[in-house]
């Protein structure tokens, strides 16, 4: 029996150089086929979330890394006796931008529930857009979009599920409650 068949795939965290996560993931994905690593590497995961910010009164959605400095890989790295298999080990070690496995010379597999929770986090971010800044009750913000452009107001309620804020704005001497999305305001 070959060593490849005795190893079962497990999830591992790879520590990468800062800002190199995307390059590492792309490099591994490109090299899998060329170096015949399909039977060893099943998935490469770089967890990202959607983030909303306003630039020049335009809403922009960008991607932000959930765990900067880390890429996760589903790989057959250890045999049934927990010995490291050479081929996948050197494949990863030879990837530019990788510092090493979390755990060093004795990589520690992640618990599948850890990866499941990361995947849930990614899926949740697909549905909701997180603001780049966080708001607090009682904070004064400036409105940068809509009919109340350039008005300032006080945050009365924060609804993270819907991405909305209830703000009290002083209009003609009257306190008026206004509901706005996160991206329509900025810290003043």
Image (tube, grey):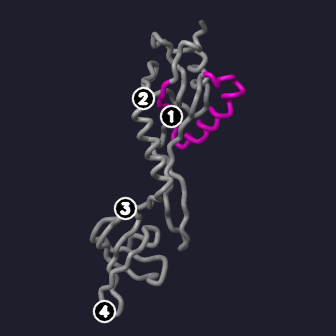
The reply to whether callout 3 and callout 4 are in contact (CB within 8 Å) is: no
Q: Nearer the viewer, residue 74 or 31?
A: 74
Measure the C-alpha gap from mark 3 to mark 1: 28 Å
Tag 2's secondary structure?
loop
Of the image marks 1 and 4, the number of the one nearer the N terminus? 1
Residue named by callout 4: 173
Determine contact: label 1, label 2, CB under 8 Å: yes
**Residue range (magenta):** 10-39
Q: Which of these two is toward me, 23 or 173?
A: 173
- Point 59% across, 6% down: residue: 1
- Pointer 3 local density, CA inside 10 Å: few below 14, some 14–19, many at least 20: some
Q: Crowdedness of circle 2 by 10 Å Cα count: few (<14), some, many (20+)?
A: some
> In the displayed structure, does residue 94 sit left or right of residue 65?
right
Residue visible at 58% across and 42% down in the picture: 22
Horizontal and vertical percent position of residue 130: 44, 58
**N-term mark: 3 or 1:** 1
* SS at mark 4 in the image: loop
Q: Quadrant of residue 181?
A: bottom left
Looking at the image, which residue sits at the far left? 138
User: Mark 3 highlights which residue?
Assistant: 160
Q: Which residue is mark 2?
A: 110
Residue 179 within the magenta-colored segment of the rendering? no
Q: Measured along the vertical axis of the image, is residue 72 above or below residue 169?
A: above
Looking at the image, is mark 3 or mark 4 earlier in the sequence? 3
Query: Residue placed farthest to the top in the image?
Result: 1
Q: Along the polypeptide, which appears first: circle 2 or circle 4?
A: 2
| SS at circle 3 | loop
Query: Image quadrant for the C terminus?
Result: bottom left
At label 1, counting other C-alpha atoms closer than 10 Å, the crowd grade (few under 14, some 14-19, many 20 or more) is many
Q: Dot 1 corresponds to which residue?
A: 72
Nearer the N terminus, badge 3 or badge 2?
2
């Amino acid at each position: 029996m070959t060593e490849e068949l005795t190893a079962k795939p497990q999830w591992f965290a790879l520590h990468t150089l800062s800002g190199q996560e995307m390059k590492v993931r792309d490099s591994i994905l490109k090299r899998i086929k060329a170096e015949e690593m399909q039977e060893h590497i099943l998935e490469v995961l770089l967890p990202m979330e959607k983030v909303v910010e306003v630039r020049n009164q335009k809403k922009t959605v960008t991607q932000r890394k959930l765990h900067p400095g880390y890429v996760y890989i589903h790989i057959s790295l250890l045999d049934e006796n927990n010995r490291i298999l050479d081929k996948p080990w050197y494949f990863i070690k030879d990837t530019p931008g990788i510092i090493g496995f979390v755990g060093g010379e004795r990589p520690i597999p992640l618990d599948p529930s850890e990866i499941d929770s990361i995947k849930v986090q990614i899926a949740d971010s697909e549905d909701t857009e997180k603001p780049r800044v966080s708001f607090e009750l009682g904070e004064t913000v400036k409105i940068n979009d809509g009919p109340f452009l350039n008005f300032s107001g006080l945050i009365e309620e924060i609804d993270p599920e819907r991405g909305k804020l209830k703000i009290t704005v002083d209009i003609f001497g009257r306190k008026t409650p206004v509901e706005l999305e996160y991206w329509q305001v900025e810290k003043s």
